[in-house]
Image (tube, helix red, strand yellow):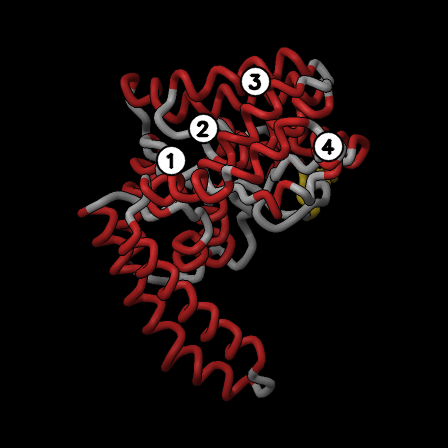
Amino acid sequence: MLIFIPMLSSAQVNNYLSYHRDIVRAEEYLANQQFKESLAIYNSLSNRYEHVFRRDLKVAAQISAHINDADQLFYFLEQGMKNGWTLKEIKKSKNIKAYQNHSFWQKLKDNQLEYEKEFHKNLNEPLRAEIKAMFGQDQKRALRVALTPVQKWRERYTNRKFVPNNRSQVRRINQIIDEIGYPGEKIIGDKSWATVIISHNEHDTIYKELRPKLYKAFEKGELSAIDLAMIETWRVVVDTERKDQGFAIWEQTINAREASHADSLRQSIGLRSIALNNKLILLGKELGMNFFLSPFHGGLITVKE
């Protein structure tokens, strides 16, 4: 099955498609252990783009720690905390832990509330609360489906409760995109809630209307490349009964034809190739760093000839 990718105009290329292509360049330097060159690209993002994704601030902070650049580390930690990265989460980063006795660490601790206030002042809080509640409903029903042991009962609950609720939620998200924008990290401070809800939407006519809006949201920095790829991949894998692996974003084994197709899709939205993805996974394990490459997996994508 061929996946049609909405075309991006030359004017649009200067926005977040360009951002994600810059990230790939930074990741290529990183994979070759050219850390300063990689960090220079991450450092330039805030000067050229309205929104820098939290994931990229986390990667830049770890690179700074690895090359013992305390000034850059403090900068990216501070920017990350202003963008929703908590000190509790930061402490989980192995190579950043070594800096807890540094003079700047106390400043981060003292300013936690100020950073949190700055993070929330830039968000649409009513919308954040609405999408969070929707996500809670989605997860509650998804868990009910997963825990129902008898297939007949599971299918009945899915068709009577889960599917109608999900379709209603996705139509609401479609309306929100029209009125406000995509409810993701940039607008509500969370990248996962709406993405997961949309990913659960199967065999529904609304996606034909929603899909070009997702690409527009991507161009504006409201939706990251990996989250767009996740939505698209989940959709096509379900619709084709796994005959098409889409962007191939999970830990899996695919053939050379599927890999070539996936890399073509990845390139179209500025997402790293499968080969680069695998190199970064191995490097992350070697250095004890987390590059946040995909929503759910930390394993290699194996390509069989």
Q: Quadrant of the C terminus?
A: top right
- Mark number, residue 268: 2
Q: Is residue 70 left or right of residue 266?
A: right
The disc labelled 2 sits on which kind of residue? Answer: Ser
Taking the spot 54% from the left edge, 39% from the top edge, the residue there is 110
User: In the image shown, does 1 or 115 lie closer to the viewer?
Assistant: 115
Q: What residue did someone put label 1 on?
A: 5
Which of marks 3 and 4 precedes in the sequence? 3
Q: What residue did someone put label 4 on?
A: 101
Where residue 304 sits: x, y (%)? 74, 39
Q: Considering only vertical position in the picture, is 146 above or below 186?
A: below
Q: What residue did someone put label 3 on?
A: 25
Between disc 4 and disc 3, the foreground one is 4
Kindly indicate the quadrant of the structure image that contains residue 107. Answer: top right
Taking the spot 31% from the left edge, 64% from the top edge, the residue there is 169
Q: CA distance from mark 1 to mark 4?
A: 49 Å
Q: Is residue 137 left or right of residue 130?
A: right
Q: Considering only vertical position in the picture, is 277 above or below 254?
A: above
Which residue occupies the extreme left position in the image? 179
Taking the spot 32% from the left edge, 26% from the top edge, the residue there is 8
Q: Is residue 87 visible?
A: yes
- Crowd class of label 2 (few under 14; some 14 to 19; many from 20; radius 10 Å): some
Element on which disc 1 rests: loop
Which of marks 4 and 2 precedes in the sequence? 4
Q: Decide: marks 2, 1 in contact (CB < 8 A)?
A: yes
